[in-house]
Image: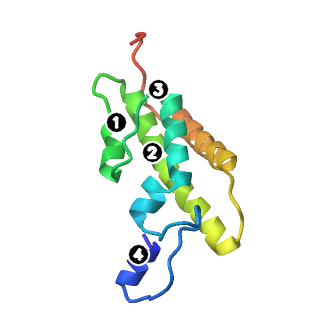
C-alpha cells in the first residue's frame, strides 16, 4: 500500500501525517489498526457482532474466526473485516486527495451497505440452531 512509510522506503522523501487523525505519522499499522478513526470503526464492528476484535495486527483481525460458527457467519465476518479496511483506505484517500472530511457515520454506512450486499450474494448458509 502506498502509505507514507512505504513511499519513504522507496525514496520518496516527504513529511508524514495521518490524514484521518492528523496527529501521528502514517504507516499501515497506524492507519488501519491504531488511528482513533480506525479504532472507533473496529470497536463499533465488535459491539455489533458481540465479539472482541484484536487490533494488534492485521493477522489478529482475522483470528476472530470460530469453527463452531456457520460458513455464512464466517464469510460475513471476513466481509466485515475487508470492508472496514477498504473503507478506512477510501476515507484516507478522500481526505488526502479530495480534501473531503469523511465522518464516522458515513464510514459506518458504507461498511453496512457493502457487507449487506455481500450477504445477499453469498451461497453459504447458516446453521439452524440458536447457538
Looking at the image, the residue that sits furthest to the front is 23
Residue identified by numbered label 2: 81
Question: What separation in Å lies between label 4 and label 2 (alpha carbons)?
Answer: 23 Å
Q: Considering only order in the chain, which callout, 2 or 4, is on the residue closer to the N terminus?
A: 4
Determine whether the residue tagged by mark 2 lies in a helix, strand or loop: helix
Residue identified by numbered label 3: 50
Count of numbered circles in the view: 4
Q: Is residue 118 left or right of residue 10?
A: right
Q: Position of residue 18 (x, y in %)?
A: 53, 68
Q: Considering only order in the chain, which callout, 3 or 2, is on the residue closer to the N terminus?
A: 3
When the figure is inspected, residue 31 is found, relative to residue 4, above or below; the finding is above
Residue identified by numbered label 1: 64
Q: Considering only order in the chain, which callout, 2 or 1, is on the residue closer to the N terminus?
A: 1
Question: What separation in Å lies between label 3 and label 1 (alpha carbons)?
Answer: 11 Å
Q: Quadrant of residue 22?
A: bottom right
Determine whether the residue tagged by mark 1 lies in a helix, strand or loop: helix
Q: Considering only order in the chain, which callout, 4 or 3, is on the residue closer to the N terminus?
A: 4
Residue identified by numbered label 4: 5
Question: What separation in Å lies between label 1 and label 2 (alpha carbons)?
Answer: 10 Å
Labelled disc at residue 89: none
Question: What separation in Å lies between label 3 and label 4 (alpha carbons)?
Answer: 34 Å
Q: Residues within 10 Å of mark 1 (few under 14, many from 20)?
A: some
Visible in this render: residue 5?
yes
Q: Residues within 10 Å of mark 2 (few under 14, many from 20)?
A: many
Circle nearer the viewer, 4 or 2: 4
Amino acid at each position: 500500500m502506498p502509505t507514507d512509510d512505504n513511499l519513504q522506503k522507496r525514496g520518496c522523501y516527504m513529511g508524514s501525517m495521518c490524514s484521518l487523525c492528523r496527529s501521528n505519522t502514517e504507516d499501515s499499522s497506524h492507519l488501519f489498526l491504531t488511528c482513533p478513526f480506525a479504532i472507533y470503526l473496529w470497536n463499533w464492528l465488535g459491539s455489533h457482532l458481540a465479539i472482541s476484535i484484536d487490533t494488534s495486527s492485521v493477522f489478529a483481525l482475522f483470528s476472530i474466526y470460530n469453527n463452531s460458527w456457520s460458513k455464512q457467519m464466517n464469510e460475513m465476518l471476513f466481509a466485515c473485516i475487508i470492508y472496514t479496511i477498504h473503507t478506512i483506505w477510501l476515507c484516507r484517500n478522500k481526505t488526502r486527495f479530495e480534501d473531503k472530511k469523511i465522518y464516522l457515520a458515513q464510514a459506518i454506512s458504507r461498511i453496512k451497505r457493502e457487507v449487506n450486499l455481500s450477504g445477499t450474494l453469498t451461497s453459504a448458509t447458516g446453521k439452524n440452531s440458536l447457538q
